[in-house]
């Protein structure tokens, strides 16, 4: 079982984004990865669809290994 869950406020304790804080938006326990809001922004190319006519490049939050975050009160 993960030591953090969706909605928890966490701080990144290791890696390139060390010191950043944010809230957990999703947890993948099988892969031991979490997505923290506002941390590790990545760019992804999106194809045009009916919902998104333009397509193009979109910034989304990337995953971080669960061992690199700690819960903050």
Image (cartoon, grey):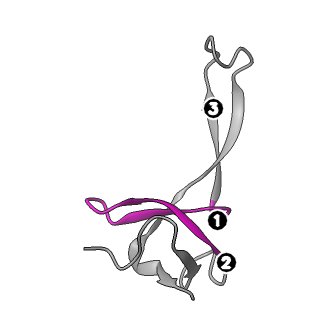
Return the residue at label 3: 45
Q: Is residue 38 rendered to the left or right of residue 10?
A: right
Q: Position of residue 68 (x, y in %)?
A: 47, 79
Assign the C terminus to one quadrant of the image. bottom right
Magenta stretch, residue numbers: 21-40
Q: Residues within 10 Å of mark 1 (few under 14, many from 20)?
A: many
Nearest the camera: 56 or 53? Answer: 53
- Give the Cα separation between the discs numbered 3 and 1: 19 Å
Q: Position of residue 20 (x, y in %)?
A: 67, 78
The label on residue 56 is none
Quarter location, residue 40: bottom right
Q: Position of residue 18 (x, y in %)?
A: 62, 81
Return the residue at label 1: 39
Depth check, mark 2 against mark 3: the one in front is 2
Return the residue at label 2: 20
Q: In the rendered image of this protein, does residue 60 appear above or below residue 29?
A: above
């Amino acid at each position: 079982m993960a030591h953090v869950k969706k909605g928890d406020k966490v701080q990144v304790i290791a890696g390139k984004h060390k010191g950043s804080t944010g809230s957990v938006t999703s947890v993948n326990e099988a892969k031991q990865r979490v997505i923290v809001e506002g941390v590790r922004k990545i760019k992804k190319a999106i194809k045009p669809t009916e919902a998104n006519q333009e397509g193009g490049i979109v910034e989304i939050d990337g995953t971080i290994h669960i061992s690199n975050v700690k819960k903050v009160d």
